[in-house]
Amino acid sequence: GAGVSQSPSNKVTEKGKDVELRCDPISGHTALYWYRQSLGQGLEFLIYFQGNSAPDKSGLPSDRFSAERTGGSVSTLTIQRTQQEDSAVYLCASSLQSTGGVYTIYFGEGSWLTVV
Amino acid sequence: DQQVKQNSPSLSVQEGRISILNCDYTNSMFDYFLWYKKYPAEGPTFLISISSIKDKNEDGRFTVFLNKSAKHLSLHIVPSQPGDSAVYFCAASAGQTGANNLFFGTGTRLTVIP
């Protein structure tokens, strides 16, 4: 597709269940980012992948959160044993490169997660 | 701790008038600032940026002003149009090192009244 694609667009899950959120970046983009926005908060950086380098996981809020990127393209963000405070919109973004201008990042539409 | 703050959650402006969206930051190391615009059910899209070596950057109807001493920036939209109605996020980074070092504000919802 032409843009960053995320699925599911909406997910309601019970507390304690695991969820997987998928991101398909723009073709050819080497950098991929995950952000989340909780109610009343700004966008919070979670994790960043750049090519074959080790990911920057510095933003992950707990060890219940993990992400992988297979083949340098599609990424999956996994949240284990979900808690109500995990409810947020999870945004994926990609860019051609990670340096030389942060304005080159393109966001997907987000996955709205509600933990009940 | 929010390093980038947008203290006005919402703003309403009449069509044709000026919209002024404000943003404050606390980290004096920030030297690159961006504004993103977000429509409902869409991801944020880049709007305009400014480097700390400048105090103003203009792009059509959009102008961003930076006051480093006050750690304050603002986005001016003149004239405002109904299509400008969206949530506007301010973001800052210490160097253009990628979106993993971007700090976002909480956003201001702008409504332009026809």
Image: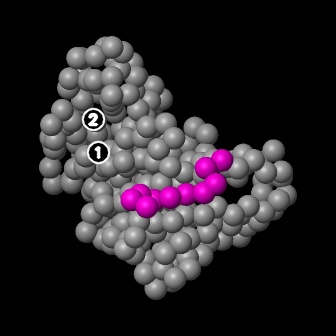
The C terminus of chain A, quarter of image: top right
Q: Amino acid at mark 2?
A: Leu
Given contact means CB atoms under 8 Å apart, are the residues at marks 2 and 1 in contact?
A: yes
Q: Which residue is mark 2?
A: B75
Q: Which residue is mark 1?
A: B47
Q: Position of residue B22 (x, y in %)?
A: 34, 33
Q: Chain of mark 2?
A: B
Q: CA distance from mark 2 to mark 1?
A: 10 Å
Q: Magenta span covers which residues?
A: A1-10
**Rendered position, B75 above or below B44:** above
Label 1: state its secondary structure. Answer: strand
Determine the residue positioned at 32% across, 49% down: B46
Determine the residue positioned at 19% across, 37% down: B63
Residue B4 seen: no
Residue A21 seen: yes
Closest to the observer, B68 or B17: B17
In the image, residue B4 lies in the stretch drawn in magenta: no
Determine the residue positioned at 33% across, 72% down: A97
Closest to the observer, B55 or A36: A36
Q: Main secondary structure of the magenta part?
A: loop
- In the image, A85: left or right of B98? right
Q: What color scheme is it?
A: one colour
